[in-house]
Amino acid sequence: MRKGIPVSPGVAVGTAYCIPDIFVDPRGKPLDETEVLPELNRFEAALEATAADLRALYQKVASQVGPSEAEIFRAHEAILHDHSFREKVRDYVVTEKQSASAALRHVMDEYTAIFEKTEDEYLRERLDDVRDVIRRLSGHLSAMLQPGQTPIQGPLIAIAEELLPSHVVALGDLQISGVVTQTGGQTSHAAIIARSRGIPAVTGIRGILRQVATGDMVIVDGRDGHVIFNPDPETEKAYRKLEREFFDLKGHLAENRDHPAVSADGEHIDLLANINNVADCKTAAAMGASGVGLFRTEYLFLTHPDVPDEEEQLTAYRDVIRASPNHRVTIRTLDIGGDKTVPYLGHAREANPFLGWRSIRLSLEHPEFFLTQLRAVLRAAAPEPGVKKNVRLMFPMITTLEELRRVRMIVRRAQNELTAERKPQGEVSIGLMLEVPAAAIMIETFLKNVDYVSVGSNDLVQYLMAADRDNPKVSHLCQPLSPAVLHVLNQVISACRAAGKPVTLCGEMAGAPRAFLLLFGMGLRSFSMSPAFVPVIKDLVSHVTARRAEQIVQTALEFTTSRQIQHYMSEQLREIAPDLSMLESET
Ligand code: PEP
Ligand code: MG
């Protein structure tokens, strides 16, 4: 049994499906003499396929973003064609009788050892490029293996070093019922994806891929973060029972999808969904959300083979608007950087990526590219017969008023261009994502310049607590249920209400039962969350009055430690809706 960080609640029992990672030792039993030549041929084919990818990427990025941004792919091609690199890989296959994947890993280790000795930042960044090229090559190698492999039967527990958007695409229709990863915290990709699918997940289990093999039985307990490998029959039986209860509870809650979201004393709340793509919109509708409160557009970019152009973006956004409940969508512009990167928007290694060149800072530095996205959103919002749209534009990580002004100028430019080109466009309201403490402090000033505010509590908490949201070592600090966070949220919500500006919260805490009770008590009435949590919160709010929630807030704000708040909120939740405790990750 191992203990990690519970990031998506519930219990699942299933067969391990290890997502191979080139950077985790893929050494296998030695190849037969007869297998060596075919393996070298496979490597050649992967080299060709990778070179073709890189050339296509160069062309697309050069036309969409700019030639200097595309240069990175020329550099990657040069690495691919490097004679000594190819020879090292071939030599290893021949002499060690290992697969090309194992050879790539070995060569990567060799380069890492050499590069690590250097103090030169430029050279260290080149190591990232080698890693990218090797990852791409290895993707082709494993794709070539696919046809002969028998897919294992679900339900499966996905086990990975880190769950990347590309993995999620590759996993496609496999029946994944749980996720365990080595890296990542409460708001990492793995966590957000698992929560949006309503499946339990645990992160922060170091060395996981060395401990478990595809086909092993695994139990994931997303309530307290336990992961059990190859359990004894008694344990398995007990967890299968819990899994059934979890399933039944989710099924039972989903039955309330057509009921209004209203508290025990008649206060209506707005429950919106966080989505990444059209498939999530369908889940949002099935779960009874009344709209989409956060469309994370970066997934379109992160899962695209190259760069989506304006027409592709237009289609993607329009499809999402059409598929969303009530055609109500808040579209967040590209939020890349920090933990999520695309090579064509800058590749510099940063000492503190979350404090660095990310999100709106990156968009403002690539104004033409940003303009393309804004044009696509405005066009997607254009009226269509029989579809009454309600589209909002939202900008992430705004820190200063100057940024907001520049953003507004670029929006105006996009609107003017479309008018001049006689292309139809829709009305959109403009909102600020409140994620940076500086903006929280200056909230009154910002409120005069936006139509609405959406609190991005995942980032706001990490910046308030100075604790990286993806680093398991500091996850005890990156906690929404802490005194400082609650005080700031209370002030922000009050300021928005006093100014008469709509306010939503779209971080993961909106769908966490204990945190929800506090936000509701602070007067928040609009929440955006992973679709799977919409029925949970709808049920929870029906068991509590606004009056009681206000009293809970009063008490909670008097506590001076996170521990007291968490303990008190667990008690309150058990009193108000005992069944829902199973749906809360206990961090
Ligand atoms: C947030 O920061 O709370 C948020 C919703 O955005 P993301 O998790 O995509 O950074
Ligand atoms: Mg954020």
Image (cartoon, rainbow, N blue to C red):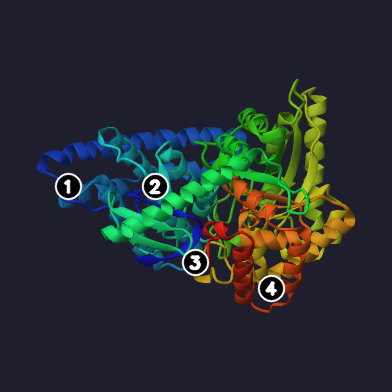
- Say left or right for 277 vs 403: left
- Report if the CB atoms under discs 2 and 1 are less than 8 Å apart: no
N-terminal label among 2 and 4: 2
Q: Please tell me in which quadrant of the rendered image residue 370 appears.
A: top right
The span from disc 2 to disc 3 (Cα, nearest Å) is: 25 Å
**Eyeballing the image, is 417 above or below 40?**
above
Q: Which residue is mark 4?
A: 483
Local crowd at mark 2 within 10 Å, few (<14), some, or many (≥20)? some
| Image quadrant, ligand 2 | bottom right
Residue 244 is left or right of residue 361, and the answer is left
Depth check: give the residue in front, 545 or 236.
545
Residue tagged 2: 135
Q: Are marks 4 and 1 in contact (CB under 8 Å)?
A: no
Image coords of residue 193 (percent x, y) = 52, 48
How many residues crowd mark 4 within 10 Å: few (<14), some (14–19), many (20+)? some
Amino acid beneath label 3: Pro
- Mark 3 lies on residue: 472
Q: Tell me the CA gap for discs 4 and 1.
A: 61 Å
Picture coordinates of residue 89, whole percent (x, y): 26, 48
In primary-sequence order, the first of circles 4 and 3 is 3
> Quadrant of residue 293 in the image?
top right
Closer mark to the observer between disc 4 and disc 1: 4
Q: Residue at x 73, y 53 (%)?
A: 264
Choose the circle earlier in sequence order: 1 or 3.
1
Residue sitting at x 29%, y 60%: 234
Distance from label 2 to label 4 (Cα)? 43 Å
Please tell me whether mark 1 sits on a helix, a strand or a loop. helix
**Within 10 Å of the Cα at label 1, are there few (<14), some (14-19), or many (20+) other Cα atoms?**
some
Q: 184 or 96: nearer the eye?
A: 184
Q: Which residue is mark 1?
A: 94
The numbered mark, 2 or 1, whose residue comes first in the sequence reads 1
